[in-house]
Amino acid sequence: MTGSEKRYFKVFTLRLAPGTSGDQHFLFDAIAAMTTYDEQALLEQVSDRRSQKHFTTIKHRLYDAVLRSLSAFHAEGSVDARLGRLMHQVEVLHDKALYEDSERILNSARRLARSHDRQLVLLAIARWDQRLLERNNYAFATKERMVRLQQDTDAAMAEQQELNALWESKSRILLNLYRGGQARCAEAIAEVHGILDQPLLRDPDRLRTPRARFLYHHLHSAASFATGEMPVCMDHLTSAFNTLEEARAKFFEEPNLAISTLSNLIYVKVRMGLFEDAFSLLHDFRSLPARWNMPETEDLDLKLFATSTSLELSIHSRMGAFDKALELTPVVERGMARHEQRLGPMRKAAFFYQLAYAHFGAGSPDLALRWSQRLLNDIHIDDSTDIVCFGRMLNLMAHIDAGKLDTVPYALRNTGRFLSTRARTHRFEPGFLAMVKDVVKARNPIELQAVYAAFLEKIAPLELDPFEQVVFEHMDPIAWAQSKLTGRPFAEIVRERAMRVKAAA
């Protein structure tokens, strides 16, 4: 809670229940003074108070009082909060038979809901309209008003159905993308195309609201990313962000939409080798809260830290500037410590992988091992996600670079079993596992060079295979094999290859 929220809580509870707030305030102050909540320490503080026997009850009442205080403090804090207050006033006035006042408030709610595209509230308003028309046996109803009500209700219903359908299609694509990664077979691509094959997804200009048009482009960007069509993805992300900018008044309370859309656009620019564009957009991204006048909240601070830092790590690593990526390590560690309880497991996993890869690229395989082990052992997420699969492979590469060949067979068996049980054995994975096995078996430098040469010959064509593009999103095995064969630093070869991608873009 902010300082203002804490002060308001004291005033709110004193005014609401002046005779019963003493124990609550004592408990509130004790909890507020803690850096981390410790119930045992809290019990020791109340051990000499009469309220000790009722500690659990007081704690639950305090929780309820804090929620009511926050609700009152933020009663005007958002469009939805204002609409909720207005709708409650409509109900109170109606129950007191003050119908004209009730209708006046209802009209205010209708204008606010319509201007911000709150279709569900518009449907609730329509129900109150119906109740007001029914009073006194329809004494105040007219045919014109009933027709207008029906038209407004049908419009809100059609808009909401459109939004529901778009949201459901978008979520099906994103669920598959988050859990299974990008499509790596014809069946997965066919599934994505099947989701897109519906009339609603053919022409954004026919959609009824800016939110629907945003969802249209968001959905298509996710679909094209899943199928590896980066130029198409970039176009739809650009259109999605432009939709948000053009209708900013309808989205200003949802800064996460602008943040996530622009961050995705930056990432796709990086994938396409458009590094200058990516850095320029990263600057725009960091100025977005000021441009959109976003309120400073813990949620916004978390999103800005997690997204901007992750993007900068990605850009530097993709360009082979691993030394610059490592300069962000203290930033990541401080941010993760600060947001430990609120940072999701996928974001933590991504940071662990990015730092492991940065250390690997900078020639510090021991530190790469340490970070990749944290990814594999400390994060509890769906083990079939891309980040875990490639984390395991990066871990094996780090073992090899660190010269710890005695521990490779055990890690290799675990990784092979892991990939086979999760249907992750595509074209790259079997070749990679075979190479690691042959590295362990090699008896001399000549045999070792032959292993890396065979591996490079096998994987080089995969760079042009759309089903294998996800491999090169997470690492550069071609540069690694070339480094082994030539003795040149891995980072140097990654930089050269990045410049070729940039030139092609």
Image (spheres, grey):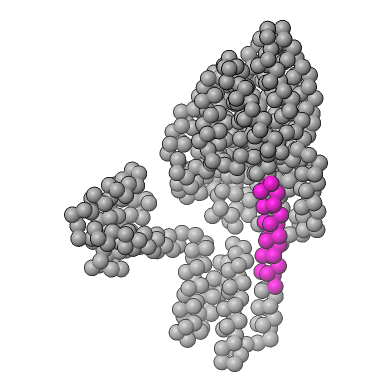
In the rendering, at what x and y percent does residue 378 appear? 50, 35
Up/down of 412 relative to 300, above or below: above
Asked if 123 appears above or below 399 in the picture, the reply is: below
Question: Height in image: 291 above or below 124?
Answer: above
Residue 205: x and y in percent read 76, 56
Quarter-wise, where is residue 112 in the image? bottom right
Residue name at image x 62 percent, y 63 percent = 117
The residue nearer to you, when weighing 432 against 489, is 432
Q: Position of residue 483 (x, y in %)?
A: 67, 14
Query: Is residue 257 toward the left or the right of residue 453 in the image?
Result: left
Q: Is residue 439 visible?
A: yes
Nearest to the observer: residue 29 or residue 396 = 396
Indicate whether residue 18 is drawn in magenta: no
> Left of 1 or right of it: where is 416?
right
Q: Identify the residue at image location x=69%, y=65%.
A: 161
**In magenta stretch: residue 159:** yes
**Between 39 and 330, the one nearer to me in the picture:** 39
* Quarter of the C terminus within the rendering: top right
Residue extending furthest left?
48
> Which segment did they paint magenta?
154-176
- Taking the image as shown, residue 342 lies to the left or right of residue 416, namely left
Residue drawn at x 45%, y 48% as measured from the top left: 297
Residue at position x 34%, y 47% from top? Answer: 37
Question: Magenta-highlighted stretch: main secondary structure?
Answer: helix
Above or below 474: residue 383? below
Q: Position of residue 192 (x, y in %)?
A: 76, 48
Q: Foreground: 488 or 137?
A: 488
Quadrant of the rendered structure where residue 57 is? bottom left
Q: Is residue 333 left or right of residue 150?
A: left
Residue 274 visible in image: no
**Figure label count:** 0
